[in-house]
């Protein structure tokens, strides 16, 4: 299983998202491979179908429900609409659900 964290340098939610993924990954057996992918420019953002920083993908799929239908690829910060309100990082439950689904 591959977990990718796509972000750009200077993203204020980059480090906390990396920490979230690392913490949740330690609970899995076997632990997934974690790869941080730097998105440096608009061309790379479009090529990678980057919806903003940070983005988490498990085996190539964005963990946010409904994100696969979006096409607003951009080099900007990402805002997530969670049950707890707007957030600069994805909901931990989405990450757990994506990891559980990928391990089935």
Image: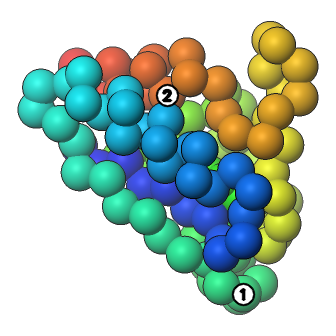
Q: Helix or strand or loop: what does disc 2 sit on?
A: helix
Q: Position of residue 90 (x, y in %)?
A: 66, 34
Q: Position of residue 37 (x, y in %)?
A: 48, 70
Badge 1 local density, few (<14 within 10 Å), some, or many (20+)?
few
- Residue 59 visible: yes
Badge 2 local density, few (<14 within 10 Å), some, or many (20+)?
many
Relative vertical location of residue 44 with respect to residue 65 in this rendering, above or below: below
Q: Residue at x 36, y 40 (%)?
A: 22
Tell me if 86 is positioned left or right of 24 in this view. Answer: right
Image marks 2 and 1: residues in contact by CB distance under 8 Å: no
Relative vertical location of residue 30 with respect to residue 9 in this rendering, above or below: above
- The quarter of the displayed image where residue 9 is located: bottom right
Residue at the farthest right position: 86
- Quadrant where the image shows the C terminus: top left
Question: Residues under labels 2 and 1: Cα distance?
Answer: 26 Å
Q: Helix or strand or loop: what does disc 1 sit on?
A: loop
Q: Name the mark on residue 95.
A: 2
In this orientation, which residue lies closer to the viewer: 13 or 85?
Answer: 13
Q: Position of residue 46 (x, y in %)?
A: 70, 76
In this orientation, which residue lies closer to the viewer: 6 or 19?
Answer: 19
- Residue 56 visible: no
Relative vertical location of residue 69 with respect to residue 66 in this rendering, above or below: below
Q: Which residue is mark 1?
A: 41
Q: Residue at x 23, y 51 (%)?
A: 33
Tell me if 99 is positioned left or right of 94 in this view. Answer: left
Q: Position of residue 88 (x, y in %)?
A: 78, 41
- The quarter of the displayed image where residue 93 is located: top right
Relative vertical location of residue 15 with respect to residue 69 in this rendering, above or below: below
């Amino acid at each position: 299983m591959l977990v990718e964290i796509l972000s750009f340098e200077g993203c204020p939610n980059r480090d906390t998202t990396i920490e979230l993924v690392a913490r949740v990954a330690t609970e899995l057996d076997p632990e997934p491979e974690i790869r941080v992918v730097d998105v440096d420019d608009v061309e790379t953002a479009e090529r990678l179908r980057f919806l903003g920083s940070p983005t988490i993908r498990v085996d190539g799929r964005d963990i946010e429900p409904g994100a696969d239908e979006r096409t607003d690829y951009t080099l900007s910060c990402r805002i997530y609409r969670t049950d707890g309100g707007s957030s600069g990082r994805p909901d931990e439950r989405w990450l757990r659900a994506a990891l559980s689904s990928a391990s089935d």
